[in-house]
Amino acid sequence: MRGGPVLVFLSGLLLLISGAVSISVMQAADESCERACLNRIVDQYLSALVAHDPSRLPLAKNVRFTEDGVQLQLGDALWATAGGLGTYKLVFAEPEANAIGAYAVVQENGSGALLALRLKVDKRKITEVETLVARKPTTGILNTDNLTEPRPAFLENVPTEERPSREEMVSIVNKYFDGIEQGNGDIVPFDPDCIRIENGIQTCPGSASSPLGALSCGAQLSTKIFTYIQSVNPRRFPVVDRERGLVLAIVRFNHPATQQTVAVPGRGRITMGRYSTWPNSTQIAELFKIKNRKIKEITAAIVTGAYKVPMGWD
Amino acid sequence: MVKFTEDSQRLELGYGFWRTATAKGAYKFYMDDPVVGQVVYFGTMREAGNPVSLVLRLRIEQKKIAEIETIVIRTGMNPSRPADTGAESFEKMGGPDPLFLETIPPAERVSRDELARTANKYFSSMQLNDGKCDYSFFADDCSRIENGQQATEGRNTMASGSGQNNSYTAQKGCRAQFETGLLHFVTRIRDRRFVVLDTEHGVALAFGFFDHAAGNTRTFQTPDGRTVAAGPTQPWTREIAEALKVEKGKIRRIIAIFQRCPYGMNSGWSSWEDSLSDKARW
């Protein structure tokens, strides 16, 4: 009996502590956002976009938004013009970094545009919105009719024991950009059957009727036909989805246009593309599928702009 | 260190057009403002042999160049005439309209503020143009050149001058164009920087951005009561340098050089807030 009040006090304290702990655990559970939660946010974003109403989103007070590298008020630009969504939607995530990436086809006054979207989430609220919108006038090539659904490789899970670390996945993708800068496909760990699709159009392997023929992704690089891409800088890797083996790189290709032709072994001197004719840069959101530590597939959204155009996040 | 931009991107001096320019062209038009130590040049050049139009602003401090701002109009960057940089058209003109070079009689000269205010009426009346403002700031003989093309009074070949009721036409004069209310699709004219105010010649030169927000701003009412949908279907912006000749409080001549750029782009010379503001600065 003598210890009664103390025991009551202690058990009350324990109750308080355990209550506080469980509240804290509940809050943490509420505030974390796993893959399904992140995917839902993308769906919310796309629905709000076509409704022209960003207020439907769980936005952080200091949310920051860019379209094609330009910081704007959320609600402006594609938010004002998006008329509907196509069937193409590819969503991926890095829950550990609260980061989401997505590609979607959006109808804009009768024309298809390819949206690349990156979101950052904190406590279930969106803090960063980065978008690139590939439209016909601002890109060399675009065919959204080809983009009806994601290619299966981007949706396949990688067995847990085969997943490389984030660092290793980024390193593999970095070699691709190094290979472009150096005109050397041999330093890039390509899967022999690698396919690259840019703005809805397959660009490697090339078509048999193209000037270089049906070259593989690696062989294309080694021709040095991309010499006009002097540098790939800056490079960011904001979403690495280890479960699916995906790396999203957001980069800028810089084309100073100081050289228009290049000697291709066995083919003589070849004129490089139109991007070699005036100083310009392309902003690119490029998604890589890594399988067996090799680049299996690539899909990209590309927007052409002024030389060394700021991307808004560097 | 001297600051340099090309097409609103900050670069190291020696990069961009510095590495691709191959020759000077024949068209030259200088506008200067010794009060603020600035000079703007409209000219033509060649890039790998291709004609380009150039806008160049220099700010001079103690006889040294402190700021360099350039816009280079290349093929594909002019939405209404993608194959045309305006350079060859400018060169056919031989030089600027002689009126720009005439001095204003001293008794008729206005203050820098008044010159800027009159010129700014042009931008304020174009933004979300509804045809209902007082457009008497246009002189009766006002005419406008855009990227080397006559854009007013029917002496033009611009694609936008189709004469249809729903799109503004270059077949009309400066004032009549504004009275149609069909320029409504210019939803915001922002970051208006008057960098030359030459009261001796009555010339005001401004850099700015014409935003086309598209979306529901494409649908509007004209002064004659029609509901019209017109203008760009995607959001994009025109990066522009515009010289205006003002005499006796009225705008008589306008020369614009412009190109397409990303929607909402910053000039590289303004804060984010100023870049989105439609307030004129000088």
Image (tube, coloured by chain):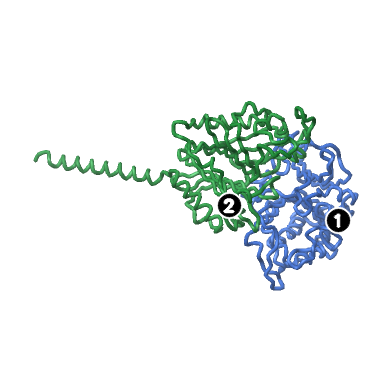
Q: Quadrant of the N terminus of chain A?
A: top left
Q: Quadrant of the C terminus of chain A?
A: top right
Callout 2 crowding tier (Cα within 10 Å): few <14, some 14–19, many ≥20: some
How far across and how far down the image is residue B127, in percent? 69, 60
Mark 1, chain letter?
A: B
Residue name at image x 76 percent, y 57 percent: B119
Point out the residue furthest to the front here: A208
Residue receiving disc 2: A73
On the rendered structure, is B253 left or right of A244?
A: right
Question: Does residue A76 lie above or below A276 as drawn?
Answer: below
Q: CA distance from mark 1 to mark 2?
A: 46 Å
Question: Does residue B58 lie above or below A46 as drawn?
Answer: above
On the rendered structure, is A42 left or right of A269?
A: left
Residue receiving disc 1: B106
- Tag 1–tag 2 contact (CB < 8 Å): no
Report the mark closest to the observer, 1 or 2. Answer: 2
The blue one among the chains is B
How far across and how far down the image is residue B203, in percent? 81, 53
How far across and how far down the image is residue A21, in percent? 30, 41
Residue name at image x 72 percent, y 40 percent: A280
